[in-house]
Amino acid sequence: MVVNPNCKTINVKAQINRDDSLFSFYQKLIALRKNQEYKEVFVYGTFESCALPEKNLMAYLRKTKTKKLFIAANYQNETQAVVLPGRIKHILLANDKVEEQDGKIVLSGYQAVVMEVE
C-alpha cells in the first residue's frame, strides 16, 4: 500500500494541537459521552430515528426520562435544513456554528451537531 504524499502535512502531529481538527472533535465527542451529566442518555437512552426525506442527512434522538438529545449530521457539501424536535436547551458539540431559523437548524456542508432539546 502506498503512503499518501500529503502525509507530511496531514497527520496526527499536525492535528493534535489544533482545536478545530478532526482529532480534537473526536476527543470532545468521547469526553461528552463520558460526561456524568449525559452518560446515562448516551449509554442507556432509547434511540429514535428521525426519518428525513433529504438525502445525505442523518438525525436521531437519544432519550431518557429526564434528558433528550438530538444528533444531526449533514453528509454532503451543500447546506441542509433539519426540523428540530423541540426547543434547543444547549448545544453540546458542533463542528461549525449552528444557525436556528423557524424551528429548524441549518447545517453547513459536512456539519454535525449534538444538542439537548426540550
Image (spheres, helix red, strand yellow):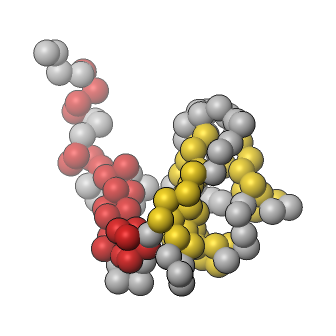
Up/down of 45 relative to 76, above or below = below
In the picture, which quadrant includes the C terminus?
A: bottom right
Visible residue check, residue 28 = no
Q: Residue at x 31, y 52 (%)?
A: 23
Q: Which residue is drawn at 38% across and 51% down?
A: 21
Image mark count:
0
Could you tell whether 110 is left or right of 9 in the image?
right
In this view, the residue in front, 35 or 17, is 35
The x, y position of residue 93, in whole percent, is 50, 65
Q: In the displayed orientation, state which residue is furthest to the right.
A: 102
Up/down of 67 relative to 43, above or below = below
Q: Quadrant of residue 76?
A: top right
Could you tell whether 84 is left or right of 13 in the image?
right
The x, y position of residue 38, in whole percent, is 42, 77
The x, y position of residue 116, in whole percent, is 58, 73
In this view, the residue in front, 60 or 8, is 60
Q: Residue at x 81, y 62 (%)?
A: 103
Q: In the displayed orientation, state which residue is furthest to the top.
A: 2
Q: In the displayed orientation, state which residue is furthest to the left.
A: 1
Up/down of 83 relative to 69, above or below = above
In the picture, which quadrant includes the N terminus?
A: top left
Could you tell whether 83 is left or right of 73 in the image?
right
Q: In which quarter of the image is residue 75?
A: top right
The x, y position of residue 5, in whole percent, is 24, 21
Visible residue check, residue 15 = yes
Q: Which residue is drawn at 24% across and 22% down?
A: 4
